[in-house]
Amino acid sequence: MLLQARYSATTFSKYMSTAPRLTIDLSALVHNWRFMKQKSGNAEAAAVVKADAYGLGIEPVVDALSKAGCKTFFTAMMEEAIRVRKISPDARVIVLNGVVAETTKTATEQSIIPVLSSIEQIAMWKEHGGGHPSVVHVDTGMNRLGLRMQEAEALSANPELLGSINPVMLMSHLACADEPNDPKNIQQLETFIQTAEQFPGLSTCFANSAGIMLGADYHFSTTRPGIALYGAEAVNNVPNPMKPVVTAEARILQIRRAEKGETIGYGAEQHLDRETKVAVCSGGYADGYHRSASGAGVTLRKDGSAGAMGAIAGHRVPVLGRVSMDLTTFDVTDVPQQVLDENQWLELFGNTIPVDDLARACGTIGYELLTSLGNRYHREYRGG
């Protein structure tokens, strides 16, 4: 069953047929959440839906996961939490970036739970939270958000202050879980266990997607899978067990022939070493297809390393020249003529080109690619 983009704020017409498209498999998303739920053992498996559900759309993602049984969602911003609340009125919604003065009223009125990461946020919630629940975030070694150990100890020793903020969960964040053998993981685990002992009765949340894969010692009361739900790699240098969720495609606008020795694109950086069949596709860095994916002409490629690959009917095709704002060119010389035509779709990433393969070609990670997807994509949701 194909659901047109009923969740999208933009209505696409026949006059916008050159826009790139995303096909989002909500059934694969649900499968991945259930897989992470099973991996979480006795812990509750939540879902991280920040950054517009990693670029795929909060509303359809939360709707599908809620129907699958997910009861807790993590966002980064209050605005995202409000969107989750509209889709899932009974869910537990937790805001990782906490509250500022302007958002405390919204949090209490909509039963949204802030993560308190500083003494200042704790004081603010004490004054304005009205006894509504909160989550206490402790820093176990990442040196990003979270109470330092001395601050956490002082809070645990102050029952009046602790009671005024009504904490329901203690959480921390792993810095190196995507590298399972990194000693930092054990160090952080030991610190979190020691800290949790000072807050008896609170549920505990420690593991992200990669942390879940570290094993039961890291699961505690609640896990919070994120990137794995969306089909990307959570752990480095191991086979990815997740189903691909999103396919990004660009429309082929023109297939043209270029002679040996000619150049392609801005800067004339790529010189052709053969007569080449070139597919010019609608989609570029304005759509989150990074300029660093270029086949030539960017700093990342000065060492001669290859650029990204696309795919047509399962045939992998390299990017030619620089990715530009609205257009990208691919070498389709070796694609059989019977599967090659103007106006057909070329896969930027999906089943043939995993999003993490594209990310590596860009010198980045799958997280950045997914959350950089532009708003010009026509989104189609399947299943779920």
Image (cartoon, helix red, strand yellow):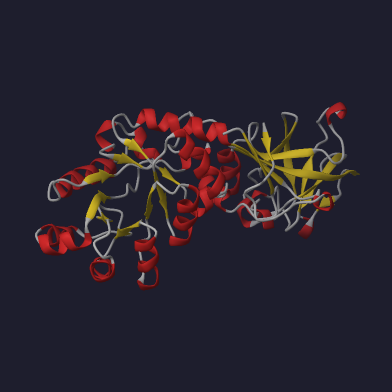
Towards the viewer: 208 or 291: 208
Q: Left or right of 247: which side holds 368?
A: left
Where in the figure is residue 309, as x and y percent of width and height? Answer: 68, 39
Q: Residue at x 70, y 51 (%)?
A: 296
Where in the figure is residue 143, as x and y percent of width and height? Answer: 30, 58
Whether residue 233 is visible: no
Q: Left or right of 295: which side holds 334?
A: right
Where in the figure is residue 180, as x and y percent of width and height? Answer: 34, 36
Look at the picture and state if 324 lies above or below 314. below
Marker count (numbered)? 0
Screen quadrant of the C terminus: top right
Q: Left or right of 260: which side holds 30?
A: left
Residue 256 position by quadrant: top right
Whether residue 110 is visible: yes
Q: Residue at x 32, y 49 (%)?
A: 173
Screen quadrant of the N terminus: top right
Q: Residue at x 58, y 40 (%)?
A: 355
Where in the figure is residue 307, as x and y percent of width and height? Answer: 66, 45
Q: Left or right of 17: which side holds 140?
A: left
Look at the picture and state if 71 lies above or below 112. above
Towards the viewer: 26 or 206: 26
